[in-house]
Image (cartoon, grey):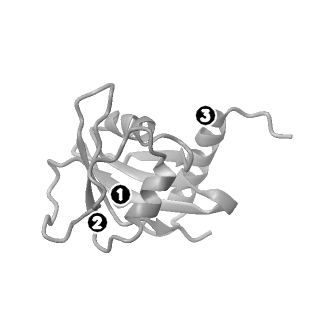
Amino acid sequence: MDVRTEREQRDLFAGTVLRAVAQGAGPLLRVTADDGTRPVVVAFDHELVSDVLNRVSWSGGYANLFVIAGEGKMIRASVVPPSASLDEGAAESLGLGAVHDDSTIGMLMANVSTARDGLTVQVRLPRNAADLSSISAPEPVPA
């Protein structure tokens, strides 16, 4: 029986992702922040969108997001703040209005998965003023 806390499991998984990147596992980190870093945020699919995006806000709104889904699957998405240079013509609307902060990141990834070139999602976070992030169409990460 694994007695690790969820945070310890998330940290362990983040280390696995970073080792894979260091060993040349393809271009997993597509997002670069203004300061030149490539922030990685790891989340479980049952975590609240508000909690995940609060962690993204720690890196200025930029993140290479890896979501651990059921059955050992991992989904990657790119998150950038609205001030980033995006082709707004390629972005699609989620069609659900604002994403509620009680939604899970897994639910959001399932809805976003229909977008082809990215999508603008409005999220009102209770603890800060960030209200928009752009999320790429998520994709499975090869094992």
Q: Are marks 2 and 3 in contact (CB under 8 Å)?
A: no
Report the disc number at residue 7: 3
Classify mark 1: helix, strand or loop.
strand
Q: Are marks 1 and 2 in contact (CB under 8 Å)?
A: yes
Classify mark 3: helix, strand or loop.
helix
Q: What amino acid is at disc 3?
A: Arg
Please tell me whether residue 130 is drawn above or below residue 65 in the rendered image: above
Answer with left or right where residue 49 lies relative to residue 131: right
Which residue matches tag 1?
A: 78
- Mark nearer the viewer, 2 or 3: 2
Report the disc number at residue 118: 2
Name the outermost residue toward the front.
96
Quick one: quadrant of the N terminus? Answer: top right
Q: What amino acid is at disc 2?
A: Gly
Q: If you read the primary sequence from the N terminus, does the residue marked by circle 2 or circle 3 appear first?
A: 3
Name the outermost residue toward the top.
127
Q: Can you give x and y, in whole percent of width and height, for residue 129 in the image?
A: 22, 30
The Cα–Cα distance between marks 3 and 1, rounded to whole angstroms, is 21 Å
Q: Can you give x and y, in whole percent of width and height, for residue 61 in the image?
A: 28, 42
